[in-house]
Image (tube, helix red, strand yellow):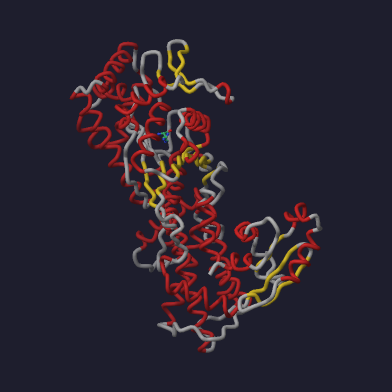
Amino acid sequence: MDYKKYIASKINVEGVSVEEIASSIALPPNSQMGDYALPCFKFAKALRKSPAVIAQDLAKEISTDDVISEVSAINGYLNFKINKSGLAREVLGRIAQQGEKYGSSDVGAGRTICIDYSSVNIAKPFHIGHLSTTVLGSALYKIFNFLGYNAVGINHLGDYGTQFGKLISAYKHWGNREEVENGGIHAINDLYVRFNNEADEAMEKEAREYFRLIENGDKEANDLFEWFKKLTLEYVQKIYDRLDVHFDSYAGERFYTDKMQPVIDELREKGLLKESNGAQIVDLEPYGMPPCLILRSDGASLYATRDIAAAIYRKKTYDFYKCLYVVAYQQNLHFRQFFKVLELMGKEWAKDLVHVAYGMVSLEDGAMSTRKGKVVWLEDVISKCVEKAYAVINEKNPDLANKAEIAEKVGVGAVIFGALYNNKIKDITFSYDKVLSFEGETSVYVQYTCARASSVLEKAEGYDAALPEELNPTDEEFEVIKTLASFPEIVLDAADKYEPSYIARYSVDLAQKFNKFYFDCKILAAEPGVKDFRLLLTKATLRVLENALGLLGIGVPDKM
Ligand code: ARG
């Protein structure tokens, strides 16, 4: 049962929907006041009464029942106390029954949502700058699937551009097959960097020629390109596996090569194309934006041209309800521009395109900061985090079995959680010590709480899972129960705002409440009936923490 909705259904404010009231209901910081509270400030204007009077009037109208045990008005807040036994029974019963599905729903049934994320560039480094798009997009993918949507993960590969001509030229001059085969993406990147540092005019010319050859379907040039692409994808696949990241489509920029001409024709037909210094543009001045470049003066297409073709293709192929682009805020203008162009083309679905922008990640660790020409590879960040996790685990618990496996879960989890914990638009500074702390707001803290719960359950050697008729939870227990009850709405909110951070924060909140319960209430030493209930509560908490972390792509070890 959705408690907020239930409470909201009993409140009558003229002109305000039950949904709106439900979404305004919050968990008050001090549970002495109530279990749920509705702030009445925002109704003051419409009702032309003070918040305090509104709360008092509403309190008089609401009768208590099996669910709501007390209603009171305090300083403009309408406070509710819930029948604790009923809520505890209901929530624990539901978690036990639904297990790993607890928190899921079918609100998205019949709707497809395309999510464009990670979108690596072939033959270029997969670096720390790709962390957020990869883990944010992947979390959204999991969250939307959990809510019954059909999520389509799209890796819009950066596999188009003159850099491939440069790369082939560099390879022809300085590379050899064996070195590239062994060195993979690093060797390819070295060649590219060398070209940028050393190429003369003749080589630049040659590079343009190679690019033209790729475009014209020349076999040798295309074989080389495909080889670079294969090596890049093999390399990133290993990282995706570690991060539990999946895609349904790798249709990249090159895929749209033959799909751009129809777009250009349509733009022209609709009178949207204009010539400007030999180039073809869509004028966006009336909308306060610089023009959107469609064709360069040499006839070459651009990033935006391919994105317009891609959006049309996705609509046709998937008939999406929404199409998300998880891309850094540096590209804000690009998205605003091509969304506008699609709107001007009369695509009414242009309103369903969403740029999910996020902030920058930089590294605190000076030794690995981005020096000129030196990139921080994401793989190195992950490996370093796993190594550090191993060292910490080894120190805390040297006799643990499977230390390497556990360190992988902890280290990878820390990288993901570190990128997801803050609101996505914030710039973040990644610090190894911070993300690996056992005490901070970290995945390590949450995972450690899970290990603690697992260990209690293991020591208990079974319990009676039947819920007694009457439960009288202590304050600490009830805090945990209420937090467990709120998980489904947290997932909905996270989807609604494209904010996996809500789930990350929730997991820390639940872990903190569980730990308070753990330290204040004896579990294993409690009398039999109480002990069974506490074990059930422990099991439910573990389940929900696993569900929450799972949505972020983070695994939970049994022991730490
Ligand atoms: N490969 C691009 C980059 O690294 C990101 C692509 C994002 N997706 C898109 N449809 N434009 O900047």
Residue 357 vertical placement versus 417 (above, below): above
| Residue 362 visible in image | no
Residue 200 vertical placement versus 544 (above, below): above
Image point 40% across, 82% down: which residue?
461
Residue 100 position by quadrant:
bottom left
Q: Pick the residue in front: 532 or 413.
A: 532
Image point 45% across, 13% down: which residue?
275
Q: Pick the residue in front: 331 or 69.
A: 69
Q: Position of residue 93 (x, y in %)?
A: 48, 76
Q: Position of residue 463 (x, y in %)?
A: 43, 84
Image point 80% across, 62% down: which residue?
52
Image point 46% across, 57% down: which residue?
107
Q: Residue furthest left?
A: 219
Q: Position of residue 307 (x, y in %)?
A: 41, 31
Which quadrant would the C terminus be assigned to in this image? bottom left
Relative placement, left or right, of 292 versus 45 is left
Residue 392 vertical placement versus 261 (above, below): below
Residue 168 vertical placement versus 533 (above, below): above
Q: Pick the residue in front: 500 or 351.
A: 351
Residue 64 position by quadrant:
bottom right
Q: Position of residue 329 (x, y in %)?
A: 52, 36
